[in-house]
Amino acid sequence: MAPDTYAVEVEGIAKRFGKQPALDGVSVRIRRGEVYGLLGPNGAGKTTLIRSLVGLVAPEKGTVTVLGRRMPQLPVLARVGYMTQQAALYPDISAEENVRFFGAIHGRENGVREALEFVDLWDRRKSVVSTLSGGMRTRCSLACALVHKPDLLLLDEPTVGVDPQLRVQLWDGFRKMAAGGTSIVVSSHVMDEAERCDRLGLIRFGKLLAEGTVAEIKTRAGVDRLEDAFLKLSEVSES
Amino acid sequence: MSGRRVGAITKRILQQFRRDHRTLGLLFGAPLVILALLGYLLRGGGDVPRMGVVNLDGGPLGGIVASTLKSSKTVSASSLAQADAEGKLRSGDIAGYVLLPSDFSAKAQQSRLIAPEIHLEGSQPGLSQSILQAVSQSFVGLAGQSGAIQFAARVTFLYGGPSFDTLDYFGAAFIGLVVFFLVFVITAVAFLRERGQGTLERLMASPLRRAEIVLGYMLGFTVLALVQSAEVLAFSLLVLHVHNVGNVALIFLLEALMAIAAVNLGIFLSMFARTEFQAVQFIPLVIVPQLLLAGIIFPISTEPGPLQALSRVLQLTYAVEGLRNIMIKGADLSWSSLQLDLGVVLAFCVLVILAGATTLRRRIA
Ligand SMILES: Nc1ncnc2c1ncn2[C@@H]1O[C@H](COP(=O)(O)OP(=O)(O)O)[C@@H](O)[C@H]1O
Ligand SMILES: [Mg+2]
């Protein structure tokens, strides 16, 4: 396969904070136009892996290639959207002003309405962010990450605090974006979201335990449920 | 009221501070540093104001006054020729001189009138006051020799004037200071909020260059700072009638430079703080020592020697001096002292802009 078929190529990266290893030799390949689920419990290293994709974490070992460019590199970031785990917004300005700002710094002035409609916040666009509910802020944060129509969308636990109905709606949206060629990385600790991903990476203690479709992973672990696959594969990797 | 619940809060507060070494250091270190500095400033055996004595008196009294002044502990007086004294007054080497005219003794003995001329530089009311006091004290001895007499000194001011008061003196400095410190604190806090609310992380994950972030911040806050500068200036001149003989545009230029420096100092120093709380701690650490040392309250020429050297490296010293040069002395761009003041403030601006941009890069890498 040509290298360009991958949106993300991570080769054996390692990062420790103090003595605590957060990533311990992780290699991941994410294809263009796929929805890749990064699944793992709290503290597994999901956020650290995503941050290293945009150059916020400098790995001690290994290489990161995003959209065909070795990271860290600034211009390629214009084609990447990053939604942080905590809704990172300016609380004193409106939802619309936030989305417009993040669009502008990525070099795109329009698309604000589309982004806000995608997260069902168009009616509340004039609300100052500090007056929005937690779930609404999460959605606004998502709108800020995709307003510039990125080729690669990194979503760190995007559906936490979002009600089930809207969650279904958002996932439909993600699938539609992927169908349009956008590569999406979604981290989650909720197993039922895994079913909607094209492929999964199971991560724990900074190590990638397994990678593949849901079915492949279940078969490999010889279990019926993803939760069990986690336990099974953890045992294998420890022994 | 439950003692346990109250106790839980008290305990939690102490626990919080136990881990915040910086705050602890500040709490117990800063007061000592500030008090030590103040003590050294006031008791460190600093210089007393320098003055000249021009004795043209044909009689014996002039000599007595001159030697009394020269042995005075509150001023440092030296005999000078009149032209020399005038030159030194203009160059700021002396804060004033007393001239004892040729008929000084005669007048004192015949008409019981003590009539010296006192020429003051006038831009620093504190120094003028010391000189006036020392001079009038030096005449006390004469009174004993010639009985009841009248003191009729003629006092002139090179700058300011008899109605020049403390507000005129401090006003010039404070126009710059108010802007500098408020803008500094607001920028530092705003930048730390960006860190705290996670938006800085997002900016760093965008194609924005560090220089673009610093420049954008600078321009945004500079707009606010310039409006504030104009407001402070207008209020000082139009409402408070602070003494000003200089060009208002020049004052504004210097103020604007200070505002830009403050914005960038705020960005730079906020890299060394994790929370808004820690940013506020820069006030006693960075601001109070500058207030004491920049010649705002205590004239630099009267500070103890080592502190004078320290004052001379603070940009605020030059900013304050520049504002006073313009407002009190009417300096314009042809004055070399004002050129120096503006040059130092400008250089400081460039320095903090570069410092802010490079530190931002380092902290993110
Ligand atoms: N900035 C940091 N400083 C210190 N430790 C960190 C930092 N970021 C992450 N860690 C540690 O790295 C490990 C992985 O964290 P993270 O990637 O946030 O996990 P996840 O997102 O999967 O919950 C955790 O043990 C966490 O405590
Ligand atoms: Mg996380």
Image: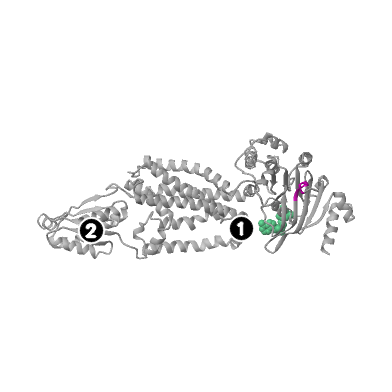
Q: Which residues are drawn in magenta?
A: A3-8
Residue visible at 62% across and 43% down? A91
Question: Considering depth in this image, is B3 or A111 the residue closer to the camera?
Answer: A111
Residue type at mark 2: give it.
Answer: Val
- Image x and y of residue A35, in percent: 79, 45
- Image x and y of residue A60, in percent: 69, 60
Question: Upstream in the sequence, badge 1 or badge 2?
Answer: 1
CB within 8 Å, label 1 to label 2: no
Which quadrant is the C terminus of chain B positioned in? bottom right
**Counting other residues with Cα less than 10 Å from the Cα at mark 2, is it few (<14), some (14-19), or many (20 or more)?**
many
Q: Chain of mark 1?
A: B
Ligand 1 sits in quadrant: bottom right
Q: Residue furthest front?
A: A2
The answer to whether A136 appears left or right of B185 in the picture is right
Residue visible at 72% across and 43% down? A151
Q: Chain of mark 2?
A: B
- Rendered image: mark on residue B135: 2
Which quadrant is the N terminus of chain B positioned in? bottom right
Residue type at mark 1: give it.
Answer: Ile
The answer to whether A15 appears left or right of B341 in the picture is right
- Image x and y of residue B59, in percent: 12, 60
